[in-house]
Image (spheres, rainbow, N blue to C red):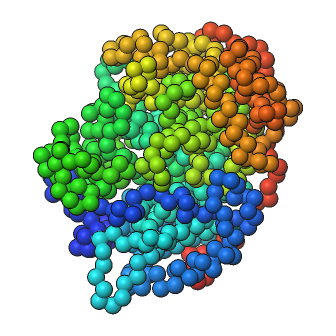
C-alpha cells in the first residue's frame, strides 16, 4: 500500500459498496463513515490472546501461554486458505516519526480493506515508510492478519467478515504477530495493542526503555507561562472522556490556561541522557469513545470530541451528535429501528470514533518533534467507587511504582466478560504486558534506578470516579479535571498545600481551586478524603494480588518491614509497614508508603525516614531477531 489519498478513496468506495462502511451524509461530517461490527466482534478477546514465549515462565500469570511450536502448527492450520477470494494487502508502517533516532517499523499483511483504511489513520504507512526502511536497512516487526472468512468463487460476502474462532498471537523472541478471526481494532490493527504494547514491552525490556499505555498532555501555567508535560495512565473508560479530549480552558477560568495533547495512548519512554526520561511518540491517531459516562457529563466535552470528526474520517458503531436530545427515530448499531422508548441503547457501549490526530485543534506543536519531550509527571489512574481518593502524590518514585503496580479498575465494555468487576491493572497494562508481570515491575525499577532521583517525573494517583455519601460520583470530572491538574502543577512548583496521610500527599480542602465550581463541601470532602478503614480492607486485596506473582515478584534489599495489615488504621508508620509487607514476604520496594522528609515547603506533615535502596531484576540477555529487509518474504511463509 502506498498510503496515498487516492488509494484511500478507492478503498473507502469499495467498502461502502460492500456495506462495511456507511458514508455519512451530514455536511458537518464530510468524508466520514460509520462502520457497524458483527455483534460477535465488538471487543478485544483477551481469552484468545496469547504470548507464546519460548519458556512458559516468561509469559507470566497475566498472559495465556501456548508452546510456540504447538501454536505455529495451529496457526498453519487456520491460516491455510483463510484469505481465499480476498485481496491481500501489504502495509509498511511506523508507529512514530520517520525521522526519530530509532523509529519502530512494522509490516502488516491483511485481507481486510477496513484494516488498511484504519491503519492509514492509526499510523504512518506507505511508500515513505518503505523507503525509510530501505534507507536504514531497518528491523521491522512482521504482522499477519486475516478475518478468517474465505470466499468461494461467486460467494456473496457479508458487511463485517469475521470468524467465531479467534487467535491473537505474539512471539516475543522473534517479534512476530499473528491475528486470525477478528476485524475489531485492537485485534486487527496490529500496530496498536499487539505491537506498540505487547511486543514493544518485550523489546523495551531487552533494550532498556519503557513501552506504556499512556497519553501525554502539555499544560501551560497562566502565570509563569511555563509548560508541563504529564503522562496520564487512566483506565479504558476514563482515558478518553477525562483527559485526552479535555478542551483548553478559557478566559478567566481557574485552570491551566492551555491544555494540549501530545499524542494518543501507546508510547515509548526512553532516555537520551541517564539522568532523565523523555517520551518518544509511537502512535499517531485519536481513537476515542464518543458517548458520556459520568455525572455532569459535560455536553461541551462531547461536542469537543465530535468536533474532531470534522471534516474527516470515521465513526465506528456511533450514533448521536451535538444535540443532547435523542432524535425521535434512529437506526441502531445492529441496523434496527430505534426510538427513545426502546429498552436498549442505540449504540454499543464500546462505540468510538477514529480520526487523524492533526485534526485536533488542541494538538501541541511538540507532537511533531521526532525526539519527543521531557516528562514532568506521570499520573496513574484507576476507576474505583471507593477507597482511592481524587488525587495523591507519591512520596518518591518507588512508592509511585507501588501505586502503578496496585492499580485497580472496574472492567468496561472494551474488555470481554461482565462489566463492573474490579480487577488489578498494573500501570494500566494488565492485558498488554508482553512478558512476565513480575519482570515488568522489576524493569520499571531498573530503568528508573539509572536516573538521578531528583530528575525523575513525579508520580500521582488519580481517581475521578469515587462515590460520595449520596452514592453519586462526587467530583464533576471532564473539563473540571484540569483543576486537579492545576494542583499537580503547583505541587511540582512547590506552591500547593498538601497533607500527609497514610497513602501519601493529598490536597487539603482549600488546596484545589474550586472557584466557580458547582460542588458542595461534602462532595469535595468525599472526593479527596483518605479513609484508613477502607485501606485496611484494601491491603488484604493487595496481598492477594501480589501472591499471584509467585517467585517472579521483585524483592527489595534490604528486607522490607514486616507488619500486619490489621495495623493499617493505627498510624502512618503502621500503614507503611502494612503496604510494604505481604504475610511477611517483601513487596516491590521497601517502605513504599513510609514518610521520607518531603522537599515541598507546602507539605503539612512529613517524617524524615528515607527509603532503602531498591534492587531490580536479574540481568536478562537481549534476544533479537536478525535485521531483515522488507523483501524477505520467508517471514510469511
Residue at 70 percent across and 55 percent down: it is 60
- Label tally: 0
Q: In the rendered view, would you say 489 is above or below 616?
A: above
Image-quadrant location for residue 117: bottom left
Q: Residue furthest right?
A: 558
- Quarter containing the C terminus: bottom right
Q: In the rendered view, would you say 129 is above or below 489?
A: below
Foreground residue among 23 and 452: 23
In x, y percent, where is residue 291?
31, 43
| Side of 219 where 69 appears, left or right | right
| Side of 246 where 538 appears, left or right | right
In x, y percent, where is residue 386?
51, 27
**Visible in this render: residue 170?**
yes
Residue at 13 percent across and 50 percent down: it is 329
Residue at 32 percent across and 56 percent down: it is 316
In x, y percent, where is residue 170?
61, 65
| Side of 255 where 136 appears, left or right | right
- Quarter containing the N terminus: bottom left
In x, y percent, where is residue 635?
60, 78
Q: Residue furthest left?
A: 328
**Visible in this render: residue 120?**
no
Image-quadrant location for residue 248: top left
| Side of 39 where 186 appears, left or right | right
Amino acid at each position: 500500500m502506498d498510503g496515498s489519498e487516492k488509494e484511500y478513496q478507492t478503498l473507502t468506495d469499495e467498502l461502502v459498496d460492500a456495506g462495511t462502511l456507511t458514508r455519512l451524509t451530514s455536511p458537518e461530517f464530510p468524508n466520514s463513515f460509520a462502520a457497524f461490527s458483527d455483534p460477535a466482534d465488538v471487543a478485544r478477546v483477551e481469552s484468545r490472546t496469547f504470548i507464546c514465549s519460548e519458556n512458559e515462565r516468561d509469559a507470566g500469570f497475566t498472559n495465556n501461554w501456548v508452546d510456540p511450536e504447538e501454536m505455529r502448527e495451529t496457526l498453519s492450520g487456520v491460516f491455510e486458505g483463510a484469505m481465499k477470494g480476498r485481496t491481500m494487502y501489504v502495509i509498511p508502517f511506523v508507529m512514530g516519526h520517520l525521522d526519530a533516532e530509532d523509529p519502530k517499523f512494522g509490516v502488516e499483511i491483511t485481507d481486510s480493506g477496513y484494516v488498511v483504511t484504519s491503519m492509514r489513520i492509526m499510523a504512518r504507512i506507505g511508500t515513505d515508510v518503505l523507503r525509510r526502511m530501505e534507507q536504514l536497512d531497518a528491523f521491522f516487526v512482521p504482522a499477519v492478519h486475516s478475518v478468517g472468512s474465505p470466499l468461494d468463487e461467486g460467494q456473496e460476502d457479508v458487511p463485517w467478515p469475521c470468524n467465531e474462532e479467534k487467535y491473537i498471537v505474539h512471539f516475543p523472541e522473534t517479534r512476530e504477530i499473528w491475528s486470525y478471526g477478528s476485524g475489531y481494532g485492537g485485534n486487527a490493527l496490529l500496530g496498536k495493542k499487539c505491537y506498540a504494547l505487547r511486543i514493544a514491552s518485550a523489546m523495551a525490556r531487552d533494550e532498556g526503555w519503557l513501552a506504556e499505555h499512556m497519553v501525554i498532555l502539555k499544560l501551560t501555567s497562566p502565570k509563569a507561562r511555563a509548560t508541563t508535560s504529564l503522562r496520564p495512565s487512566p483506565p479504558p473508560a476514563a482515558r478518553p472522556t477525562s483527559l485526552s479530549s479535555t478542551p483548553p480552558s478559557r478566559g478567566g477560568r481557574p485552570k491551566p490556561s492551555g491544555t494540549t495533547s501530545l499524542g494518543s495512548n501507546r508510547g515509548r519512554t526512553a532516555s537520551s541522557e541517564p539522568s532523565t526520561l523523555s517520551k518518544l511518540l509511537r502512535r499517531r491517531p485519536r481513537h476515542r469513545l464518543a458517548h458520556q459516562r459520568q455525572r455532569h457529563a459535560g455536553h461541551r466535552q462531547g461536542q469537543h470530541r465530535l468536533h474532531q470528526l470534522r471534516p474527516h474520517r470515521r465513526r465506528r458503531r456511533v450514533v448521536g451528535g451535538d444535540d443532547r436530545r435523542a432524535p425521535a427515530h434512529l437506526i441502531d448499531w445492529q441496523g434496527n429501528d430505534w426510538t427513545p422508548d426502546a429498552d436498549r441503547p442505540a449504540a454499543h457501549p464500546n462505540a468510538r470514533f477514529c480520526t487523524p490526530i492533526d485534526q485536533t485543534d488542541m494538538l501541541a506543536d511538540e507532537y511533531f518533534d521526532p525526539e519527543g519531550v521531557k516528562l514532568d509527571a506521570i499520573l496513574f489512574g484507576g476507576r474505583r467507587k471507593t477507597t482511592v481518593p481524587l488525587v495523591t502524590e507519591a512520596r518518591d518514585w518507588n512508592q509511585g511504582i507501588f501505586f502503578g503496580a496496585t492499580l485497580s479498575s472496574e472492567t468496561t465494555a472494551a474488555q470481554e466478560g461482565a462489566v463492573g468487576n474490579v480487577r488489578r491493572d498494573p500501570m494500566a497494562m494488565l492485558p498488554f504486558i508482553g512478558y512476565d508481570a513480575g519482570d515488568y515491575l522489576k524493569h520499571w525499577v531498573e530503568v528508573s534506578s539509572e536516573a538521578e532521583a531528583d530528575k525523575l517525573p513525579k508520580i500521582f494517583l488519580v481517581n475521578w470516579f469515587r462515590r460520595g455519601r449520596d452514592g453519586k460520583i462526587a467530583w464533576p470530572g471532564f473539563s473540571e479535571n484540569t483543576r486537579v491538574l492545576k494542583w499537580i502543577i503547583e505541587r511540582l512548583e512547590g506552591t500547593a498545600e498538601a497533607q500527609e496521610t497514610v497513602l501519601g500527599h493529598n490536597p487539603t480542602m482549600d488546596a484545589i481551586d474550586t472557584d466557580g465550581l458547582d460542588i458542595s463541601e461534602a462532595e469535595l470532602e468525599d472526593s479527596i478524603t483518605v479513609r484508613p478503614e477502607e485501606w485496611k480492607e484494601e491491603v488484604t486485596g493487595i496481598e492477594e494480588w501480589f501472591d499471584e506473582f509467585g517467585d517472579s515478584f521483585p524483592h527489595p534489599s534490604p528486607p522490607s518491614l514486616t507488619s500486619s495489615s490489621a495495623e493499617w488504621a493505627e498510624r502512618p508508620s503502621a500503614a507503611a509497614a502494612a503496604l510494604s509487607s505481604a504475610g511477611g514476604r517483601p513487596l516491590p520496594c521497601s517502605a513504599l508508603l513510609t514518610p521520607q522528609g518531603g522537599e515541598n515547603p507546602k507539605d503539612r506533615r512529613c517524617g524524615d525516614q528515607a527509603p532503602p535502596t531498591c534492587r531490580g531484576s536479574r540481568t536478562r540477555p537481549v534476544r533479537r531477531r536478525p535485521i531483515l529487509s522488507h523483501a524477505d518474504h520467508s517471514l510469511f511463509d
